[in-house]
Image (spheres, helix red, strand yellow):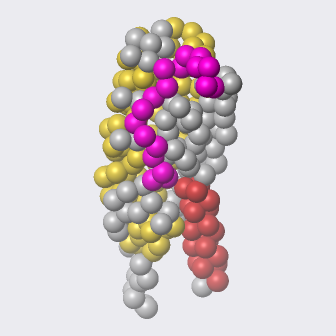
Amino acid sequence: MARIFTSSFISIFAFFIIFNCSSAETKDSSESSSNASASGSESSNAASTRSFSPDQETEDGRCESGNCENGTGTYVYSTGDIYTGGFSSGHREGKGKFVYKNGDKFEGIYVNDLKEGDGMYFYSNGTVIRGNFAKGIIKGSGKVTFTDGSVLVTEFTDSSNSNPGPYRKKDGTETECYLQNKVLVCVKQEPGAEPKTE
């Protein structure tokens, strides 16, 4: 019993830490660890023109290769984050890959500079979220694969919360769990009930 509690506590703690590492995504402030996704602190949809302004001390980055205005290129932000993919009118557009300075990365589709549609967010600790992104945040069906091999399949209601869904541990046991304020919450099983297995 203590082992189950400890394992659950560690999973919840790890999940909480992972989702708290995410932040907003705009080109103005650069992207730093989104996410997934899952931050809910989305900034405005405006994107930087990436040109020098007398009001700013420095520009927010540089086009390292390709065409970062209307085509495909690699843009390196002043923060050290790197985006490689499609651009339209200076905005991220189409298929792209964003690598964060902290080791996280996002691969998926951008529309008007924001994550949109099917995408995958890879945390530097090995946790992966695959799901539907809308206006930069994960919303709708999604799957979280934790570093210990456990998996939560759920419907995200916003970047911090989800509806109940199956949570399968590495050993195959399954229970019903959901996200509440970025914390994994599992429904208690009835005493004496056999855990679900596949």
The answer to if 48 sits in the magenta stretch is yes
Horizontal side of 17 relative to 193 (left or right) equals right
Looking at the image, which residue sits at the far front? 55
Image quarter for residue 72? top left
Number of numbered tags placed on the structure image = 0
Where is residue 148? Give x, y as percent: 59, 57
69 on left or right of 74: left
Q: Main secondary structure of the magenta part?
A: loop
Q: Is residue 44 above or below residue 190?
A: above
State which quarter of the image contains the C terminus.
bottom left
Rendered view: 143 above or below 78: below
Q: Nearer the viewer, residue 93 or 178?
A: 93
Give the x, y percent position of residue 46: 42, 32
Q: Range of the magenta residues?
A: 39-56
Seen from the viewer's position, the closer of residues 9 and 57 is: 57
Residue at x 43%, y 91% (from the top left corner): 191
Q: Looking at the image, can residue 76 be seen?
A: no
Q: Where is residue 147 in the image (x, y as percent from the top left)?
A: 59, 53
Residue 74 placement: quadrant: top right
**Position of 36 compared to 104: left or right?**
left
Q: Is residue 146 visible?
A: yes
* Depicted 142 relative to depicted 98: above or below: below
- Asked if residue 63 is positioned above or below residue 57 in the image, the reply reads above
